[in-house]
Image: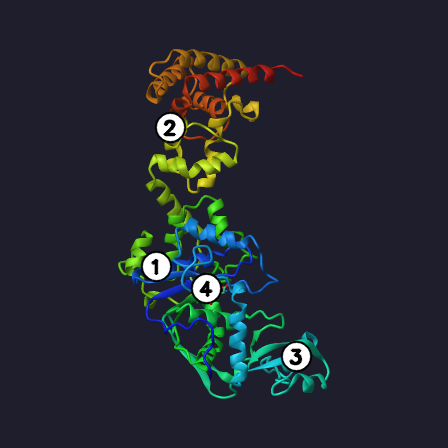
């Protein structure tokens, strides 16, 4: 068979891995999962990691999805050595810019008798499928067009104007490959359909494009999700027909929910990478979590970084049972990584979440408030809820909260007024001094510390739950505390005055 005119590159020698997402929307968390292992393996072996966009399905194409793929992979810290945005020796890396190459390869297969044109309409194909199903046969194309010219086929009716190109799958024998994760996998050829490889609009289907590109981009290891296993024999036939060496294959297990259903965008709102970013997961926590799905460190460690994975990654250690996507475990890991952050780093990470909620403050104030939540915040997105009271002087709470159980209006007002005096004069304005002073006040007034502290908590944080009270008052500072106690006292006056 004549060699294609397209770039002629020697068979794979270097280690070159790729991911090939389709820009159809928010990238799925599975894309991050597979990218992680591709990138780690490439780095481990001194190879290169390539990003290729498989954008030939024009019906599902979403223009801004490309940028979402770039952004979310960068956010995860997974960079690529070659790709549509950074270029590289195998350009272009967008399949829609390589249409001529695919057409040329389809022609070569037709000439060699491995592929044929098919003019059957969608209606006819649907009928054929129905008939096969009613005979309990695997639905396959019935090869009406095989061996026919356009004219011969048109004479039979039900023919479309532009043909597709189909693979001519052998009737006998089997096609197999050895998967680095699963071992030998074999499919009987008679069960394979004469797959369309070039559509009537001149665009290739995934099967032709992926093989042509993986070959010309010198991909040494095709590492992808399990859902592509059944496509692999078709790809192997194409490699064989073109006379190309096979890459290695590794099919990672699908991510599953606890009920073992597939993690899907339709069912799981949290299945996109953007969701994790927007909900305040740290990329290092998500990477660690993804690395634990189906993979384990030789020493059983659960907490490890990307470089540790690079040092150890080995596809033979990947388990084939669908790993369960356990969000509780991710929350736990995220909490761990948050606690590892320095105070300044935590400020940087939560700042975008606060700003989005309209909460801006100078660094000094932010640096003082974050220690109050550092130990218990699980996701950065919780910051506006946990810290919101620091940013507003008037809260929107129900005034009756200012009457903790056992305190009447007069005693609450009196306590607030006396508290203002204490706050005014206290020196230093520090949490231990505040605590000592307010404990003494409770005793002196004959109220329980719990009652007084709840009153102060509501007045200062507008909520019955807050970070430790006196530390919080210290961070708020004398002026803000005074303003809030005063506002609370005035609220009680209003509360007492019937409208
Ligand atoms: N375009 C396919 C996808 O969206 C690529 C599959 C492969 O890696 O071969 O996942």
User: How far from the left and from the top, in percent, is residue 411?
Assistant: 50, 14
User: Which of the two residues, 290 or 433, is positioned nearer the viewer here?
Assistant: 290
Query: Which residue corresponds to mark 2?
Result: 368
Identify which residue, 282 or 260, lies in the foreground: 282
User: Can residue 207 be seen?
Assistant: no
Crowd band around label 2 with a 10 angstrom C-alpha radius: few (<14), some (14–19), many (20+): some
N-term mark: 4 or 1: 1
| Mark pair 2, 4: CA separation | 44 Å
Cα separation, mark 4 vs mark 1, equals 19 Å
Which residue, given by chain and number where applicable, does mark 4 sit on?
254
First in sequence: mark 1 or mark 3?
1
**Residue 142 appears in the picture as rendered:** yes
Residue 334 place in picture, x, y as percent: 39, 46
Place of residue 424 in the rendered image (x, y in percent of width and height, measured from the top left):
41, 12
Q: Secondary structure at mark 3?
A: strand
255 is higher (above) or lower (below) than 446: below
Q: According to the image, label 1 marks what residue?
A: 40
Occupied quadrant, residue 12: bottom left
Q: Secondary structure at mark 2?
A: helix
Disc 1 is placed on an element classified as helix
Q: For residue 242, what is the image quadrant?
A: bottom left
Question: Is residue 196 rendered to the left or right of residue 318?
Answer: right
Q: Nearer the viewer, residue 211 or 479?
A: 211
Question: Splitting the image into 4 quarters, where does residue 179 fall?
Answer: bottom left
CB at disc 1 and ligand 1 closer than 8 Å: no
Q: Tell me the residue that label 3 is attached to.
A: 119
């Amino acid at each position: 068979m004549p060699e294609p005119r397209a770039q002629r590159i020697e068979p794979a020698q270097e280690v070159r891995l790729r991911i090939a997402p389709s820009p159809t929307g928010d990238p799925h968390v599975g894309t991050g999962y597979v990218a992680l292992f591709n990138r780690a393996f490439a780095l481990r072996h001194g190879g290169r990691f390539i990003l290729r966009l498989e954008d030939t399905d024009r019906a599902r194409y979403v223009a801004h999805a490309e940028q979402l793929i770039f952004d979310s992979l960068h956010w995860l810290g997974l960079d690529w050595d070659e790709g549509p945005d950074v270029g590289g020796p195998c350009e272009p890396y967008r399949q829609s810019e390589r249409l001529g190459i695919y057409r040329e390869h389809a022609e070569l297969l037709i000439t060699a008798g491995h592929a044929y044109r098919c003019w059957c309409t969608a209606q006819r194909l649907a009928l054929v499928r129905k008939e096969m199903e009613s005979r309990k046969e695997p639905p396959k194309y019935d090869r009406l067009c095989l061996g026919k010219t356009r004219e011969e086929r048109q004479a039979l009716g039900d023919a479309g104007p532009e043909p597709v190109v189909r693979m001519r799958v052998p009737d006998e024998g089997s096609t197999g490959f050895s998967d680095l994760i699963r071992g030998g996998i074999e499919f009987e050829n008679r069960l394979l359909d004469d797959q369309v490889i070039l559509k009537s609009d001149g665009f290739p289907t995934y099967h032709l494009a992926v093989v042509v590109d993986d070959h010309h981009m010198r991909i040494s290891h095709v590492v992808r999700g399990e859902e592509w296993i059944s496509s692999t024999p078709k790809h192997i036939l194409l490699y064989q027909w073109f006379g190309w060496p096979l890459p290695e294959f590794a099919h990672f297990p699908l991510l599953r929910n606890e009920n073992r259903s597939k993690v899907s965008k339709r069912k799981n709102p949290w299945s996109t990478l953007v969701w994790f970013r927007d909900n305040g997961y740290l990329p290092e926590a998500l990477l660690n979590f993804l690395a634990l799905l189906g993979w384990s460190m030789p020493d059983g460690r659960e907490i490890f970084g990307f470089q540790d994975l690079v040092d150890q990654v080995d596809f033979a250690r990947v388990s084939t049972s669908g790993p369960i996507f356990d969000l509780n475990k991710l929350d736990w890991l995220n909490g761990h990584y948050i606690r590892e952050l320095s105070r300044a780093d935590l400020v940087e990470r939560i700042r975008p979440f606060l700003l989005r909620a309209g909460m801006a403050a100078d660094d000094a104030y932010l640096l003082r408030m974050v220690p109050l939540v550092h130990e218990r915040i699980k996701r950065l997105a919780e910051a506006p809820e946990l810290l919101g009271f620091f940013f507003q002087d008037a809260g929107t709470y129900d005034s009756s909260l200012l009457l903790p159980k056992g305190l009447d209006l007069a005693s609450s007002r009196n306590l607030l007024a006396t508290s203002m005096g204490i706050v005014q004069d206290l020196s230093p304005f520090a949490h231990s001094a505040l605590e000592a002073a307010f404990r003494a006040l409770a005793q002196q007034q004959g109220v329980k510390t719990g009652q007084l502290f709840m009153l102060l908590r509501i007045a200062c944080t507008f909520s019955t739950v807050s970070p430790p009270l006196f530390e919080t008052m210290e961070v708020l500072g004398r002026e803000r505390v005074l303003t809030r106690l005063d506002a609370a006292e005035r609220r009680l006056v209003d509360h007492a005055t019937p409208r």
